[in-house]
Amino acid sequence: MRFQKLAAALSAASITVAAPADAIAEGHTLSAAAASDWEAAYTKANAALAKLSSSDKIKIVTGVGWGNGPCVGNTPAISSIGYPSLCIQDGPLGVRYGTNVNAFTPGIQAASTFDRALIRERGKFMGEETKGCGIHVLLGPVAGPLGKNPAGGRNWEGFGADPYLQGIAMAETIEGLQSVGVQANAKHFILNEQELNRETMSSTVDDRTMHELYLWPFADAVHANVASVMCSYNKINGTWACENDGIMNKLLKQELGFRGYVMTDWNAQHTTQQSANTGLDMTMPGSDFNGGTKLWGDRLSQAVSSGQVSQSRVDDMVKRILAAWYLLGQDTSYPNTNINANVQGTHKTNIRAVARDGIVLLKNDGNVLPLKKPSKLGLVGSAAVVGQHAQNTCSDHGCNTGALGMGWGSGTATYPYFSAPADAIRARAQTDGTQVTISSTDSTSGVSGAVNGADAAIVFITSDAGEGYIEVEGNKGDRKNLDPWHNGNDLVKAVAAINNNVIVVVHSVGPVILETILTQPNVKAIVWAGLPSQENGNALVDILYGDTAPSGKLPYTIAKSANDYGTTISSSNDNFNEGLFIDYRHFDKANIAPRYEFGFGLSYTNFTYSDIAVEGKVTSGAATGNVIPGGRADLWDTVATVTVTIANSGNVKGAEVGQLYVGYPASANAPPKQLRGFEKAVLDAGAKQTVSFKLLRRDISVWDSTRQNWIIPAGEFTLYVGSSSRDIRQTGKLTAT
Ligand code: NOJ
């Protein structure tokens, strides 16, 4: 597809083109393919603009108001240019409110696969469903929150607590979605790290941390030619994100060369004139949630008449929106909007694969897993069976009752079916002739009947979170603590007191403190099953029985204590005092031993690493390229390649995620290690493969706030290659002279 070629070409040499002066500053360059695609789209947009009346233009940038169309966001059709009523719908895991759609795996599960191809396919399939429903813009993927707070309510919508992982997953998802002609939307821009007070609080972060952590994945999104970006609810340094010149005009449009449009989060706009003049391009849903206040529409027309907002600024908004529509080819034969279309196709193959390959095996003493035709299995916990959550009976999945597949809020979709653990295990047990007993509540009293005399007892525990407009069991979006819900610790203890082969399966939105569980000697295995959506049970059976060896890796750190993270939900404004040191960057710097580190995950086989080689000559200094979508062009140049051989030294087929972490020269004052590459190698027993990691200029640069540029520091870089952020198997060096 066009965008796949385009992505490949983006790293190629760039040429200077005449960019529209009002879209990006003159003299900037674009890579050849990106330039011609956006140029062609802007040429069409300019031609269309000439046919529009002033009121048409205002319509294109203003939503029709809350509740007034088939989607959560809609703009009016403009017949003179064949422009449809734009249908803008949540969300990051598929078509919200679709009645015949799939509920894809949440972003966090996709992240824990560390599998680029699966993540891209997930995006493509979501795109096919979106397009099949005649929806023009899908409101995802999510790179904000980044996940600095482990309790953050919406972390599960995004791709884990590392900007590099988030960035790769953003780009793959966007390219997948847009390859079929759907406009993606990168959100929430920016520093929207918690649900508590999200619509009133201010986040303030230092410039370096902004660039190296929070802006980083959005740069990948822009580089992947994302059509639109959603500004967030919060303030940044005292100014609302959706009327913030530094954020929208400077960072996004000038520094990152973003040529699409910025839309508000729903009702995140506060002013008519300031939002227009600071870079906002579309207001959603166009009114407040009572249908009352409308800050654009007529008020924007008046602001233009009175000279407070220039006509050229409004024209720029319109061109950006139309160019994105043309860029995705939505002007030719796009389906009519029908949110009830049956668009499921065979996409569930991807859901099962991501659900399965995102499972992280944390502990497996005595190789209790995979199961070997047990004669009796005891299952315990309400999360083993279908409950209200799986039956879609709680609005936006705002309940944690029964088996869990996703968090709650606007970023959810309706399950077409739900494979619960007990269903899938029973089906498998029939083929093995295994007797299955179950205690399907979270009460400790029913436990003994289910697990007495069983070869193994499987206990299901959960932790849930979501968007702050729904409160679930005292959790107002953000989690009130990192403990398992429903007395999960006590449930595990009760089972472990009776059965000496206990397997704990955790379905969770993010880290859970496992210390109580780990002190039970009879807990032999912990299967971190994450958020597997509708394929929950099927994916679990694939792993429990060893049809596939586990290959997922943690996309965040699991600490021994919640205090170890060094970040918490702020009760008022948040100054991001931890700076660069979130998640593993903090544990490494502060020398705190995590329980399970970022990137950790066991398999049913073993992998050995050998023969690291580093190729490339690096010169220190500043990036000098012109701005293309994503920032200066040379930031995307490969400056070094690291190769390593990974061998499957065990007895079964498996997959290993080789990870590259970079340690900067001391002068850079950087975190001890930062993820800068990962490759998943699928290996038969005894097989080996050489994997290579391409280091881009940006991967070894630091942001210099004084020079306002990315700089490669002089000195020696350490290149750590391993099986997790702490299980380093090979080390190399790279010197910037
Ligand atoms: C608010 C959420 O923050 C955003 O992610 C979502 O897309 C909109 N509501 C629309 O539902």
Image (tube, helix red, strand yellow):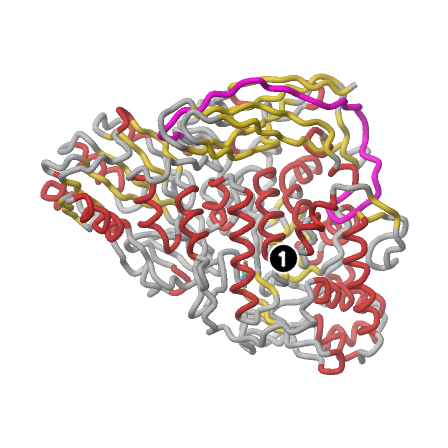
**Residue 249 pos. (x, y %):** 77, 53
Count residues near mark 1 (Cα–Cα under 10 Å), then give few for <14, some for 14-19, many for 20+: many
Residue 705 picture quarter: top right
* Kind of residue at disc 1: Ser
- Residue 701 shown left or right of residue 510 in the figure: right
- Residue 382 shown left or right of residue 305 in the figure: left
Residue 450 picture quarter: top left
The magenta stretch is: 602-631
**Residue 273 pos. (x, y %):** 76, 66
**Residue 577 pos. (x, y %):** 60, 34
Q: Does the residue labelled 1 lie within 8 Å of ligand 1?
A: no
Q: Vertical placement of 482 versus 222: above or below?
A: above
Seen at 42% across and 56% down, the residue is 348
In depth, the one of 459 and 312 nearer the eye is 459
Residue 620 part of the magenta segment: yes
Which residue lies most toward the bottom here? 79
Quadrant housing the N terminus = bottom right
Seen at 72% across and 30% down, the residue is 701
- Residue 98 shown left or right of residue 663 in the figure: left
Quadrant housing the C terminus = top right
Seen at 81% across and 59% down, the residue is 39
**Residue 241 pos. (x, y %):** 66, 54
Classify mark 1: helix, strand or loop: helix
Image mark count: 1
- Residue 220 shown left or right of residue 414 in the figure: right
Quarter of the displayed picture in which ligand 1 can be seen: bottom right
Q: Mark 1 points at which residue?
A: 179
Residue 191 part of the magenta segment: no
